[in-house]
Image (tube, rainbow, N blue to C red):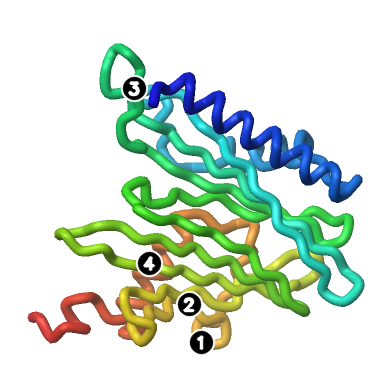
Amino acid sequence: MGLNRLGRLVGLLLLVHFFLGLAESEEFEPPRVVKMLRDQSSEFSLNDPREQSGHPIEVFEESKTHVGKTLYRGFMLRTLWPSVDDINEKLGKINWSTMCFGFFKGSKWQKGFCLELNSNATFSQISMDFKQDTFILRINEYAIECDWEHRSLEILTFKPFKNRYVLQSYSRINDSDKDIDPFYAQKRDGKRIYMDTINHSVLQDLQDHCYEKGDCQTWADKNGIE
């Protein structure tokens, strides 16, 4: 499928999604929210791949739920940077894939963060779950490595603290539900990490610290390989 054709298709899907949301709720404000998420994306510290990639494709998603009398509305902006593999601008693989999110708690905007996703993922699903005094972000991806499809389910749990949200736990479930990497727990590690300060480097540091302390095991350790 040509790049222009795919862009028009994605654009049509987004317009349909916007108008459906607008019909459901007068509070739905896609232009303003998209601008906020794009502003978050502009602060993203990862290397910008735009010089070597095709035109970006944006996918905007909304989720909402009531917890008691409070309405939570979660918004996420995915950006896909496809490579262009020939002069006819046919789509090749995805060079870079990112997501940025945030949510309204009632009328107050809670700034989230941006992360790079697995551009080689065969399946990628991100969910925002709102509970009483708890927000859970799940990033569930499958990717083929060494002719085997592996799962990576990262779970980040947050609690409100003085009008912001603080990370309570960060873990990853691998191919087996029993194969869990408990990268971070606030009670165990004693840090205070605000949701709006998180990026790839912060999460990588938590992973490295977990392995260094011995709270996490490498793949070799789990499989008894020296």
Whole-number angstrom distance, CA of label 2 to CA of label 1: 8 Å
Location of mark 1 (residue): 188
Pick the quarter of the image with the N terminus.
top left
Whole-number angstrom distance, CA of label 3 to CA of label 4: 30 Å
Is 29 displayed left or right of 127 in the figure? right
Q: Which mark is residue 90?
A: 3
State yes or no: discs 3 and 1 in contact (Cβ < 8 Å): no
Q: Nearer the viewer, residue 27 or 207?
A: 27
Q: Amino acid at mark 3?
A: Lys
Point 62% across, 71% down: residue: 136
Is 20 displayed left or right of 212 in the figure? right
Q: Amino acid at mark 4?
A: Ser
**SS for tag 3?**
loop
Point 38% across, 83% down: residue: 177
Between disc 3 and disc 1, whose residue precedes? 3
Is 173 displayed left or right of 38 in the figure? left
Instruction: Report crowding for label 3: few under 14, some 14 to 19, many 20 or more residues within 10 A (C-alpha).
Output: some
**SS for tag 2?**
strand
Location of mark 2 (residue): 184
Location of mark 4 (residue): 152
